Image: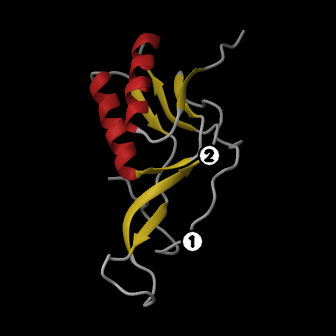
Amino acid sequence: MLTPKKISHRKMHRFDSNIKQKRTSNIIRGNFGLKTLSCSRLTSQQLDSAQKTMRKKMHRFGKILLRISPNLSITEKPSDVRMGKGKGNITHWCYPIKVGQIIFEFQGVSRHIAREVSRLCTSKLSVKTKFILTKQKN
């Protein structure tokens, strides 16, 4: 399961992610990518299961580059606890996804396999995605 190695505060505030992403909207290292079309929160379990299915479909050829890492802790209180007495315990980690952000990059596989891998990966995630290619340099 994906968790951050070092954090400054264990429990965090919630924040809104309904903004368009500018920084991570281009493919850097791979030939193909998976770009988001909507806002959501991706849990570490979703990212882990998507990565496992991608590896299985690629038959361990090629390379999968994960561009995001879960860094937002989600807390919950037990169901039988009264109001007050502080914030609950951390249940899982997630990453707030913005529109236009690249989640995965692939390299070392053909276009047909990369498209199939992205289709399988999309079924594991809770966000709408789009398969993209790198721009050819002329």
Q: Camera-side residue: 26 or 90?
A: 90
**Residue 120 at x, y percent in the picture:** 37, 27
Q: Residue furthest bottom?
A: 85
* Residue 89 visible (yes or no): yes
Whether residue 115 is situated above or below residue 35 in the rendered picture: above
Q: Residues within 10 Å of mark 2 (few under 14, many from 20)?
A: many
Labelled disc at residue 58:
none
**Residue 113 at x, y percent in the picture:** 39, 15
* Residue 60 visible (yes or no): no
Way the structure is coloured? secondary structure
Q: Write down the residue under mark 1.
A: 13
Whether residue 79 is situated above or below residue 66 in the rendered picture: below
Q: Residues within 10 Å of mark 1 (few under 14, many from 20)?
A: few
**Residue 41 at x, y percent in the picture:** 50, 51
Task: Give the secondary structure at mark 2.
Answer: loop
Q: Camera-side residue: 116 or 58?
A: 116
Report the amino acid beneath label 2: Lys
In space, the residues marked 2 and 1 are separated at their CA atoms by: 17 Å
Q: Residue at x 59, y 45 (%)?
A: 39
**Residue 69 at x, y percent in the picture:** 48, 50
Q: Residue furthest top?
A: 138
Report the amino acid beneath label 1: His
Q: Residue at x 42, y 52 (%)?
A: 43
**Quadrant placement of the C terminus:** top right
Q: Residue at x 46, y 26 (%)?
A: 106
Classify residue 74 by image quadrant: bottom left
Whether residue 60 is situated above or below residue 97 in the rendered picture: above
Task: Give the secondary structure at mark 1.
Answer: loop
